[in-house]
Image (spheres, grey):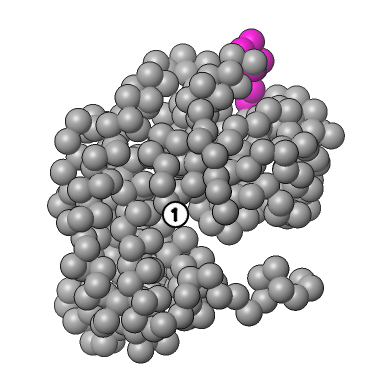
Amino acid sequence: MNYPEVKVLENVKAVLKAIEGRSYKRVYLIACGGSSALMYPSQFLIDTKVRNLTCEYLNSNEFIYRNSPAVNEEAIVILCSQEGKTPETVAAAKYAREKGATVITIAMLDDTPLQKEGEFFVKYGYYETADPIDTSYGVMYLLTAGILQAQEGLEIFDDMVRNLENLKPVVENAKKQYQDATEYYGKSCREDRVLYSLASGCNYSQSYVFCNCYMMEMQWINAIPIHAGEFFHGPFEIIEKNSPVIMLMGLDQTRFMEERALRFLEKYTDRIFRIDMKDVDFMDVDEDYRGYLGALVINNICRMFSKAIAKEREHSLDIRRYMHLVEY
């Protein structure tokens, strides 16, 4: 499919300009699957910056069925669906509009059912070719930074723009840096029937995407995303010497939890595949933004890992048994 060029920054600024003067108490970040995971880093950004706004990140259907009275004219709801057709997310956008909330939708395509249900729309670029600022993650960070600036008086929008623009060479170099590791991963894990991935903070979103989307959806491999902070409250009992674990390590405030999990794993399994942002050169990205934007770097490396295992297993990432093929 040919995805046309996008003008993300220009479109985001237009949306933020249009909602100037509106006052909000709550932000809802709503989606399903991989689109849901990309909301998590923006929730993390909001939660670590705000004093007054509250933010919730929910599955589209649960958002509707909770039927919270707080979804009203004092709420801003941002929804994402990659191609703008996810029925649950389209319904959630309609629900939020009917409740009086400000509704912003984002997708890769124009003129979709999701766009039609929103008050505002931003199109993002195809994740394989777009610069970081033009991806879905870039759009979400720009929107949330702009909302925080308008609602909380935090002067962070221009800094977010600059740091997203500076992230492109970081991602390109990190992909080269991890090329050999991804090939090794593909060969090492091709026969495994169960994989685990651990992370915390922003990066937990990438454990979710890697396990739920890339491994279970696209490779039919049982894969379990485990929050590093929850690891010691049950899941660590499953670890054995041959347990394959993808350890995602970032630079945000929660890194201690990832380091604690890694220390345990190094004692009890011989198969740790570590993606560590401390090993990546962030060049001109400000130190204060590396924790947030590291999730985009990890996303690219996890995608490489997924392609490597798909190649070794001769199982295309595009094969499905049920999705869009049967009634559900």
Q: Residue furthest right?
A: 98
Q: What residue sits right under mark 1 in the picture?
A: 205
Quarter of the C terminus within the rendering? bottom right
Residue 233 visible (yes or no): yes
Mark 1 surroundings: few (<14), some (14-19) or many (≥20) residues within 10 A = many
Residue 57 visible (yes or no): no
Q: Where is residue 326? Give x, y as percent.
A: 75, 75
Residue kind at label 1, given as amino acid type = Ser
Of 26 and 283, nearer the camera is 283
Measured along the vertical axis of the image, is residue 217 above or below residue 169? below
Along the horizontal axis of the image, is 93 left or right of 214? right
Q: Where is residue 230? Give x, y as percent.
A: 40, 64
Along the horizontal axis of the image, is 87 left or right of 31? right
Please tell me whether mark 1 sits on a helix, a strand or a loop.
helix
Tell how many labels: 1
Q: What residue lies at 26% left-to-right and 87% top-to-bottom?
A: 242
Magenta stretch prevailing secondary structure: loop
Q: What residue lies at 26% left-to-right and 68% top-to-bottom?
A: 182
Along the horizontal axis of the image, is 8 left or right of 251? right
Of 312 and 222, nearer the camera is 312
Measured along the vertical axis of the image, is residue 274 above or below residue 189? above
Does 317 lie within the magenta span? Answer: no
Q: Where is residue 82? Give x, y as percent.
A: 60, 50
The residue segment tinted magenta is 19-25
Measured along the vertical axis of the image, is residue 229 above or below residue 186? above
Q: Where is residue 22? Give x, y as percent.
A: 66, 15
